[in-house]
Structure formats: structure tokens, C-alpha cells
Image (tube, rainbow, N blue to C red):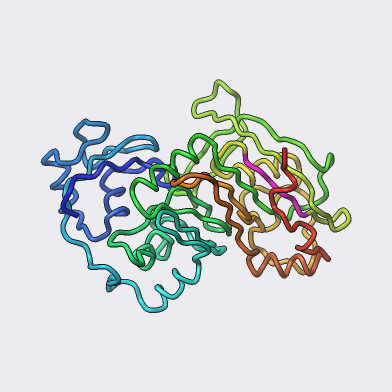
Amino acid sequence: MKQVQTIPISDADGEVRIDRWFRRTFPQLTQGQVEKMIRTGQVRVDGARVRASDRVVPGQVVRVPPLPDIPAQGERRPNLSDRDIALARSLVLHRDEHVLVLAKPHGLATQGGTRTAQHIDRLLDALMFDLDHRPRLVHRLDRDTSGVLVLGRTPDAAAFLSQAFRTREVVKVYWALVLGAPRPPAGQIRGWMRKVGGRGEADQETVRRCLQQDEGAQFAVTDYTTVSNAGQRAAWMALRPVTGRTHQLRFHMAEIGHSIIGDPKYRCDREVPGGLENRLHLHARALDIPHPRGGRMQAVAPLPEHMVRSFGVLGLDERDARDPFASFAD
């Protein structure tokens, strides 16, 4: 790329070192190239010089100088195998000039970490299609949460979509299987929470209840409703996060005594029904989001296989909720 770009740090990027952000966003660059651009002042964050170790957060804007050539259109990078490319392209739910929507599978991380070799961010080179640059993640899902994942195919589209997530213009509906049957069957969960541990590594982070005055306190709100239940053993829930905090849905369901089945971090003392796999039963079922070129678009992701099997074991029928947004219609 031979022109200067200005790219906002998205919610999907999280808080991250500026050099690491560059390596994620432009994987064709070496660490030495990144450090030289930063050291010589070509890289600016909100107009100011930075050091390679400085951290950036969502909402800040990075000045990116002209970069070395990237592979031509359609050319894949040598570190992606044919199997990697086939996997990445099999996830596509929707593609237009500005937006790419994926169905992220359970167990595949959104971004890399110290012990994560395979992740969506690594596969983005396989998703350029007719463009000469990678799409950009604009939000994240936990490794073990499946479902709808949205990307911007151009810098302008990515900035627009990131802003939509940040200003809560996106309606998100998750499906979950939880232990027990919540009473009341529908309502809203509200409270203060804060992150503990992990420091940027999503797999290590947890959240805990806290007071408003505690350092790092964030207010979280979740709407929930019961779609169906398997007696008192388990319930199929539709969840709408009004706020978008780390592990919010998992934490909130455990807080009311109905942990999401298969959650290793947020548990309650209820017995797990027999015959269910020990995997997180949380799925980002649907998104309703503004489109960069006007109007709104909806995307719905099919249930992961382990949740389909659990529905069968519990005698639940996915057809009981044909419209995932209906439970939260105003």
C-alpha cells in the first residue's frame, strides 16, 4: 500500500501493544520493519508519536505510513495451506462489497495469543477474494462461543461497523443452554463487574462482581428470555447483551444460578444432565446491524453440531424459534 492510511482501533482489537497491532493488521511486515516505522515517527496514534511498547485502545486512531507491497489479488500467502483456505471460505455466511459475515465455529479463536496457533485473524488472507487487502475484524467472540462474526472489507466499512458496535446500534441475540429453569422465565440482569487476571489474553481473563467505585468497574446489562425448557433440568435461553462486556453473558447466567452448560469458568451447583458434551453451549445466533451503505442487515448463524446434539438429547426443537429476534421485539 503506497498511501497513508488512518485506521481506528476497533473493539475487536481490544487493548494491545502498538507493535503487536501492526503485526496482526499487516502480517506481511516483520517486527524490524514495524519498529523502524515507529522509531522514525512515521506511525502516530491520535497525532502523537509512540513507542513500540505503548498500548492502544478502541477508539484511538493510528496513522499508518505507506507499506511494502502485499501479494497481488487472489494470491494466497505461503503460510496458509489449502486446508486453511478451504476452512476460512467455508465459514462465509454473507459477502458484499463492504461487509463479510462468518459463522465462527466453537473452539476457533478470533485472534491469536501465546498458545493459539490457529485463529480467524490468521485466516483473513484467504478472505480477500476480489480485493487486494485483508478484511478487518470489528468485534470478537470468545474461542468457545460459536456464531455470527462481522468483518469490514474496507477501512471505511470497518470504521463504520466498529462505531456501530461501540455506540450500541447493533442488536445481538445469543442462544444458550443453561442448567435449570430460570424463574422468572424472562427479565433483565444488571450489575457492576470487572476483569481479573489475564491482561489482554482472553483465555486467561475472568470477570467478577464488584462495586461501582472499584477500579475497572463496568456496568453490564443483559436481557434474557426462556425459549423452551427440558423440565427443571435445563433451559434454552435467548440472551440479548445491552452492553458488550467481556464474558458478560456467561457471568450473568452464573450470577442468577443458571450457568451455561459446559462453561469451565462460571459455574453453579446444579447437576448437568447426562448425555451432553462438555463444551460451552453459547452461540451468537443473530445480528441486526447498520450497513455501511445505508439500511440494516441481519445475519443468522446455524447452531454448532454439539448444540444440535444437545437439543436432541433434551428434546428441544430449534423450529420453536424461527425468528431469533422475536423474543425481544419492542
In the picture, which quadrant includes the N terminus?
bottom left
* Foreground pick, 315 / 2: 2
* Foreground pick, 159 / 236: 159
Residue that extends furthest to the front in the rendered view of this protein:
294
Residue 127: quarter of image: bottom left
Q: Can residue 199 be seen from the camera position used here?
A: no
Q: Above or below — where is 54 with respect to 177?
A: above
Badge count: 0
Residue that extends furthest to the top in the rendered view of this protein:
213
* Foreground pick, 123 / 275: 123
Q: Position of residue 262 (x, y in %)?
A: 67, 58
Q: Image point 44% across, 59% down: which residue?
A: 96
**Magenta-colored span:** 236-241
Q: Above or below — where is 313 with respect to 212?
A: below
Prevailing secondary structure class for the magenta stretch in the rendered image? strand
Q: Above or below — where is 94 with respect to 42?
A: below
Q: Is residue 152 magenta?
A: no
Q: Position of residue 218 (x, y in %)?
A: 55, 30
Q: Image point 54% across, 34% down: which residue?
A: 194
